[in-house]
Amino acid sequence: MKRTMTAAMLLALSALTMQAQQAWTLDDCIQYALEHNISLQKARLQQQSAAEDVNARQGALLPTLSAQTNQSVGYRPWQDNGIATVTNGQVNTKVDKTYYNGSYGLNAQWTVWNGGRNRNNVRLSQLQEQQATLQTEQQANSIEERICQLYTQCLYLSDAIGVSQTTLATSRKNEERGQQMVEVGLLAKADLAQLSAQRANDEYQLVEAESQLANYKLQLRQLLELGAEQEFDIVVPASTDEQALADIPALPTVYEQALATRPEIENARLGIESSKVSVAIAKAGWLPTLSLTGGLSTSTNSLSANGWGNQMKTNVNTQAGLSLSIPIFDGRQTKTSVAKAQLQQQQAVLDLQEQQKQLYQTIEGYWLDATTNQQRLRAATASTESQQASYDLLQEQFNLGLKNIVELMNGKDALMQAQQNRLQAKYLTLLSQQLLRLYSGQEIK
């Protein structure tokens, strides 16, 4: 008997463990999404591409070296002169109408100075790589924010389903009590029909809440890029009113922290720096370019009396030189490029101001939501307690025949509305608090 009970407990523990493994916490969802979300993976590929651009621009600072060769065949059909050779006292003349040429060379080129364009291109690509990294962080923050919203909505609906289940149980008890009162002549059948309709409506509300919860879980599942074969459910933590009623940080404090940590702000600042470098690159079109060149070449010909190796040696030619290019008139191309780069610099300054404005508006909205809903939570909590006490008294009076069906149903509706208002205020406060943490550079809990 003891062994049977032990085995049953182990099986139950195993089942609970499996359920726990299938349930996802908020942190599990965030970490998984940061690794598997497709849009975030694409952003990381853009970041890697920007890093390769840096390598390419740095390579442009180095000299280039290329090797070349050319092999050709010639034919002279009316050639009558040849090469005479003496063999055993006899003179032999050989006329070669087909001949072969070969050329070989090495060429090197190095841009010594081009107005700082190459070095500024390296600096620009480095800034663009940093911006690509920040854009990846922006994408990650956006995903984290969306997961927090969906997860909180799932938690709210989970609690709302609990309220609906309690309400439905109460409606069923009222319906049963009404049936008993009809049987003894204390309640009209029309009133019983109203109780039955109320019970049916509560069943519909429960199904509707369950459907909404399934829909939000589906959205969360899609955001995590989970396959259909993977089990998915969320962990419902024991949230308390104390968490929602915790102190809300001051709006200026959150905004200052966000200015120092948010990637979109740093990205906008880098945009201004990038535009300054672009102006310098455009102005380089007015400056001269100095290049160093060098080459080594040789050639061979099958008609030569010398051997291939001797020709390769004797035909060697080397050269080196400096090339200076001074722009005089380029059809206003450089002036136009500089003007457009300066306009882009002004645009970057405005982009930063716009980002700062949008950031403040977003934080201010979350801060107002947190503050307002926290106040609503306090009021809704008191209202729920009052409505619960009132409904309990109404139910007792109804059971004694002292209250009619209309008063009972009105009291029940008022209680359910107060409970829903309390849950909504609670989870909206928790959501806003978490998003304020995210914007201030802290981790979501």
Image (cartoon, grey):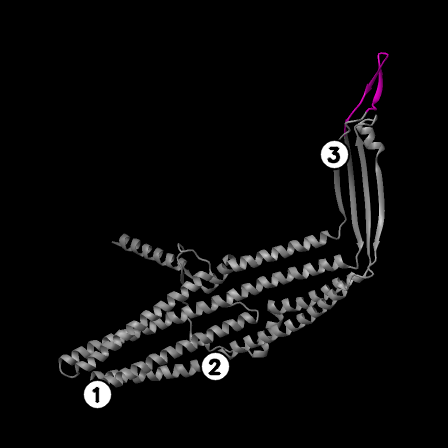
Residue at image x 61%, y 58%? 47
Q: Quadrant of residue 151?
A: bottom left
At label 3, the amino acid type is Gln
Instruction: Based on the picture, tell me whether residue 342 belongs to the magenta stretch.
Output: no
> Mark 2 packing: few (<14 Cα in 10 Å), some, or many (20+)?
some
Does the image show residue 382? yes
Is 132 on the left-hand or right-hand side of 1? Answer: right
Mark 3 against mark 1, which lies toward the viewer? 3
Q: Position of residue 33 (x, y in %)?
A: 49, 60
Q: Quadrant of residue 232?
A: bottom left
Residue at image x 66%, y 55%? 53
Dot 1 lies on which element?
loop
> Mark 3 packing: few (<14 Cα in 10 Å), some, or many (20+)?
few
Q: Magenta segment range? A: 80-99
Q: Quadrant of residue 440?
A: bottom right
Question: Which one is earlier in the sequence, the residue at label 3 or at label 1?
Answer: 3
What residue sits right under mark 2 in the picture? 372
Q: Position of residue 35 (x, y in %)?
A: 51, 57
| Front in this rendered view, residue 43 or 367 | 43
What residue sits right under mark 1 in the picture? 402
Residues at marks 3 and 2 touching, judged by CB atoms closer than 8 Å: no
At label 2, the amino acid type is Thr
Dot 2 lies on which element?
helix
Residue furthest to the top in view is 88
What residue sits right under mark 3 in the picture? 71
Separation (CA) of disc 3 from disc 1: 115 Å
Q: With respect to residue 277, does 70 lie above or below?
A: above
Question: Which one is earlier in the sequence, the residue at label 1 or at label 2?
Answer: 2
